Amino acid sequence: MIAPADPGGPWVHDIERSNLDQLLASIGSVDGMLRRFDGRRMATLEALFGEYVRELSFPEYFGWNWPAFDECMTDLEWLPAKRYLTIVEHADDLLREEPGELPTYLRQLADIGRHWSRVFALGPDWGGGEVPYHTVLVHSE
């Protein structure tokens, strides 16, 4: 089972829809930031970025490309938390119109989790040390 309090990897997890309620019950209060995304609304790269902009309140200077996504996701200065957990439901629909972008997205998520697991000496809003960042991709049965 996923341990959202553990900063170690793996940072990207695949589960089936039937296990989502169990996951949500097991994490209780995340004591951090929990965001839920709907993969059906993320069929294109632009739509995927749009969902992150909306859900994570990316700054206006966000450049709508992978380097800008990485920069914002590894900063989150405007959204400090002791741990981060993002859940992408209907993950089978992620980037369905641009499937060539999916490996980059998955690699970015792993790199983001790795980055946060190695961050040290953050202020009290972040818990003062390594910060767990996990993404759960929820697939249909």
Image: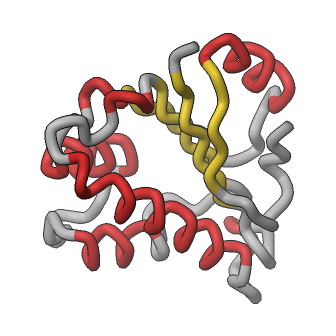
User: For the image shown, how many numbered marks are present on the structure?
Assistant: 0
Residue 58 vs residue 18: left or right? left
**Where is residue 84 shown, x and y percent of the image?**
63, 52
Q: Residue 141: where, in percent of width, then height?
A: 58, 13
Q: Nearer the viewer, residue 125 or 13?
A: 13
| Identity of the residue drawn at 25% across and 28% down | 41
Q: Residue drawn 24% across and 47% down?
A: 99
Decide: is 3 above or below 17.
below
Closest to the observer, 106 or 6 = 106
71 sits left or right of 54 in the view: right
Residue, x 75% and y 39% (percent of image)?
Answer: 30
Query: Does residue 85 lie above or below 96 as drawn?
Result: below
Quadrant where the N terminus sits is top right
Instruction: Residue 97 in the image: state x and y as whole percent.
Output: 15, 38
Q: Quadrant of residue 100?
A: bottom left
Q: Nearer the viewer, residue 101 or 77?
A: 101
Whole-percent x, y for residue 83 in the image: 70, 56
Relative to 74, does residue 20 appear above or below in the rendering?
Answer: above
